[in-house]
Image (cartoon, rainbow, N blue to C red):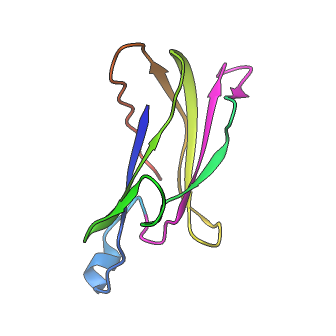
Amino acid sequence: MTIKIDVPKATSTARAARRPAYISPATTQMTLDIQTGCPGACASVSGYPTTVALTPTTNGCTSTLASTSCQLSISLAPGSYTATLSTADAGGNILSTAQQIAFTILAGQANTISLSLS
């Protein structure tokens, strides 16, 4: 599974500052927890929760004129999972989150999981 996230670059215009954005330009990190057995007896998958940096110099991230684009590859066995994802600024303040997103990994297929941060 691959998680792709684009962190917009900060702009100085007032108009851009007023538009809604689910990923803040202040985002520098993401915490991801992947669990099995939910609902009920939820248990984190080995190695989770984990926090990854989302900066232009982070492995898996590239910088464009408009954003920092990051890809995080995750190896999961086929099955049902639940993910909780939070983005944060450099001070660790939570900026956006998606909680208990159920998804299924199928063998031999491209698995696409859509989620919205709030």
Query: Which residues are drawn in magenta?
Result: 24-44
Q: Is residue 24 above or below residue 84?
A: below
40 part of magenta stretch:
yes
Q: Is residue 102 above or below residue 54?
A: above
Q: Position of residue 81 (x, y in %)?
A: 56, 24
| Residue at x 27% of width, y 66% of height | 64
Name the image quarter holding residue 21.
bottom left
Query: With 4 as the anchor, is 40 left or right in this view?
Result: right
Total number of numbered discs in the rendering: 0
| Residue at x 36% of width, y 77% of height | 10
Q: Is residue 39 above or below residue 46?
A: above
Q: Position of residue 90 (x, y in %)?
A: 59, 71
Name the image quarter holding residue 11.
bottom left
| Residue at x 46% of width, y 20% of height | 105
In-front residue for pair 88/110: 110
83 part of magenta stretch:
no
Q: Position of residue 100 (x, y in %)?
A: 57, 35
Query: With 110 as the anchor, is 72 left or right in this view?
Result: right
Query: With 72 as the anchor, is 90 left or right in this view?
Result: right
Image quadrant in which the N terminus is located = top left
